[in-house]
Amino acid sequence: MATYGKFVFLSLALVGALILSGCAPVAVKNMEGGEAARLYALNCAACHGAAGDGGIGVPLALQDFQSSVTDDYLFRTIRLGRPGRVMPNFSNLRDEEVQSIVRFIRGWAINPPNIVDKPVQGDPLHGKALFGAYCAECHGAGGEGGAGTGVTFSRPRDQPIMAPGLNNIGYLAAASDQVIKATLMHGRDGTPMRSFRRFRVSEQDIDDIVSYVRSFELQAARRQALPPRDARPALVFQSPHDFAKTVHKLKQAMVARNFLVIREGTLESGLVNRSRENQRQWVIYFGNLEFIDKPLRTDPRFGLFLPGRVTVVEQDGVVRVMAANPLVINALFNNDGLAAVIEELYQTYMNVLREAAT
Ligand code: HEC
Ligand code: HEC
């Protein structure tokens, strides 16, 4: 069990830490800004850019963004995140810490917003027709958002910034009617999001659209995240064959599916002195262009799991094949766009492991 534990630890602990920290260890260069700058650099900069210019996340330093949102919106967005849309929830931070991040982001604002919150009265049915005509091409017919997020290469080349999800439970809980309205009135200069006052859209039309966006709340509530159907951290099969034959069968199963065996070696390779490496803990890395390209285009952080890797372990005469469970890893990514890719990866691991162990 010690070996098994080590495997799970190596696969998940490292990966979990990297993802939750936004994927890149952030060097805190500028301590003058004090605690707020440090908190932003640590928690947000990897995705939104050190200067708020965007990355996997949307830009936060844009003036139109700054003048369309309230401090309360920023606070709630940080607290709640955007389930399924990459933006994590920072329920681990204290209120004072979230507040100081909000103040730090506000440091980019030239004109602070002037938004007085009161509900908008509109006709959601008319709003729905307008949404189909003016918004759906970017935000999706049901407000689900673009395929991909932010300004990274997960977006198509003709889209400088991906449209956020609007039917998102985190967005709807953070944005008041007036925040949504202000976004439509101002637009976001420097992004594909236009000001709808420039079109022949009246203020009443905008109110109708706001009411329609608000009505997404009903679906959003129903669309709660389900726990993964297979929640084991590692997929493990016991092999009836000896160690060498299991390794051989595993490689055969990969090649039969058009995968390339990219490299192989002991689990401890590079971690302990060569002569002390356990030769009965063997990792095989595999992949092919499509297998690697598709998930990377959807979410560049997926690079942490590529190429695919499967481990063969012999302990006390028992040979096991194992892989980290992609369904569990998916929860760390918080990206619904990866669902199909992750499902495929899960099936691939299950098939390859099962075949080696029969
Ligand atoms: C050409 C593409 C495009 C169209 C059309 C478009 N949007 Fe956007 N929208 C975007 C992008 C891109 C952003 C993110 C901008 C940013 O980085 O600040 C955005 C942002 C938003 C936001 C802020 C979301 C958030 O998370 O803060 C709202 C609300 C919004 N759009 C609503 C609408 C509505 C309603 C319509 C139709 C009236 C519409 N948009 C039309 C591309 C578009
Ligand atoms: C793992 C990447 C990631 C991290 C880390 C992250 N964000 Fe985000 N954030 C996103 C993405 C992606 C979106 C847009 C969601 C969408 O496209 O639907 C977003 C959206 C937002 C928005 C809404 C923007 C708008 O246009 O209204 C705010 C505000 C925000 N993030 C602030 C923060 C802050 C502050 C932190 C740090 C405490 C942070 N984020 C950390 C990825 C991230």
Image (spheres, rainbow, N blue to C red):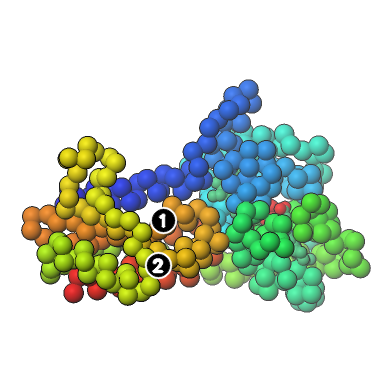
Does label 2 or label 1 sit earlier along the sequence? 1
Which image quarter: residue 184? bottom right
Q: Do tag 2 and tag 1 residues touch (Cβ < 8 Å)?
A: yes
**x%, y% of residue 177?**
74, 58
Which image quarter: residue 269? top left
What residue do we see at 15% from left, 62% from top? 244
- Choose between 326 and 289: the one closer to the eye: 289
Is residue 265 something one can see in this rendering? Answer: yes
SS at mark 1 in the image: helix
The residue that mark 2 highlights is 345
The three-letter amino acid code for the residue at tag 1 is Phe
- Asked if residue 308 is positioned above or below residue 269 in the image, the reply reads below
The residue that mark 1 highlights is 305
**x%, y% of residue 141?**
68, 74
Is residue 224 something one can see in this rendering? Answer: no
- Asked if residue 264 is positioned above or below residue 38 in the image, the reply reads below
SS at mark 2 in the image: helix
**Farthest residue, direction top:** 32
**x%, y% of residue 259?**
37, 68
Q: How far, Cα to Cα, is label 2 from label 1?
A: 10 Å
**x%, y% of residue 186?**
83, 53
The label on residue 275 is none
